[in-house]
Image (cartoon, rainbow, N blue to C red):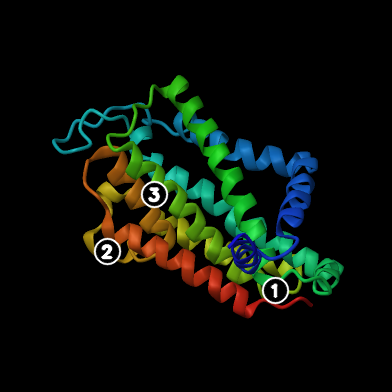
Amino acid sequence: MRTTTSTTARRVVPRGFGRLLGTETRLFARDRGSVFFTLAFPALVMVGVGLVIPGMNTSITEPGPLQGYSTIVVMLPAILATAMATPALTAVPVFIANYREQGVLTRLSTTPMPSAGVLVVHLIIGVAAFIVAAVLALALAAVVFGIPMPRSPGVTVLAVVLGAVAIFAVGLVLAARVSKGSTAQGLGMLLYFPMLFFAGLWTPRPIMPDGLAAVAAWTPLGAASQAIEEGWFSTQMPWQQLAVMVAYAVVGTVLAARLFRWR
């Protein structure tokens, strides 16, 4: 029984996966610039939006579920969505494309590690780093702006994690094929700004037209922003948005593994 269990585990987790995860994590930690940017970016965006843009500390007076909240609190879902999209679409694809360009992936192709293992390693590192960064940003925002706790903490956490996995999976699809870092950066930016629009960074969901909000709910970042909003300001379960994020996470990861090329 023990032999069967260990054999099954090896089939699920490729041989050398833990070593690759540890190596890539150490490489990430040694790059102080990347670590600082990854961990500090959400906090910088949060504080920058709150302190630089006029009216962010003004409370909303219109009747509704957001009445009494300050504008910066209402912008939280879009800011968190921006923070998860930035490394997912502008950093991870470039990193993997640089590996391909430098021949690192060619050397990895001679090992038992499958392409899915390489992608999942970067997915884990990226999502974990973002979650740490999001916690730091929210803690700082609570001190600076007095941001209240979400009404449904479990839903909020689930939305943040699923949103991060979904958008990183989209970034991995891009990383699976692009041969140069500069090309990956350009293509990532082409996806980045429309994603921010659907997330409500420029037109927050409370003032977004209903038709546009309905379309945004089918995008990974729009679904993430809307699900975080529901968790923060209500007790309702955003089933559609959660299902959309799960679909992007699963389909994106599988598609990236299928499209992946070593050279």
Q: Amino acid at mark 3?
A: Ala
Q: CA distance from mark 2 to mark 3?
A: 18 Å
Report x, y in % for residue 11: 63, 69
Q: Quadrant of residue 211?
A: bottom left
Q: Of circles 1 and 3, which is in front?
A: 3
User: Dot 3: what SS?
Assistant: helix
Left or right of 247, for residue 32: right
Q: Quadrant of residue 128?
A: top right
Q: Which residue is mark 2?
A: 214
Front one among 42 and 30: 30
Task: Name the mark on residue 257.
Answer: none
Q: Upstream in the sequence, badge 2 or badge 3?
A: 3
Q: Are marks 1 and 2 in contact (CB under 8 Å)?
A: no
Image point (34%, 40%), residue name: 154
Graded by Cα atoms within 10 Å as few (under 14), some (14 to 19) or many (20 or more), the crowding at tag 2 reads some
Q: Is residue 28 above or below residue 89?
A: above
The residue at the far left in this view is: 63
Q: Which residue is mark 3?
A: 159
Q: Amino acid at mark 2?
A: Ala
User: Dot 1: what SS?
Assistant: loop
Q: CA distance from mark 1 to mark 2?
A: 31 Å
Q: Which residue is mark 1?
A: 178
Asked whether the viewer can see residue 203, the reply is no
Front one among 83 and 194: 83
User: Dot 2: what SS?
Assistant: helix
Q: CA distance from mark 1 to mark 3?
A: 29 Å
Report x, y in % for residue 92: 66, 58
Front one among 99 and 79: 99
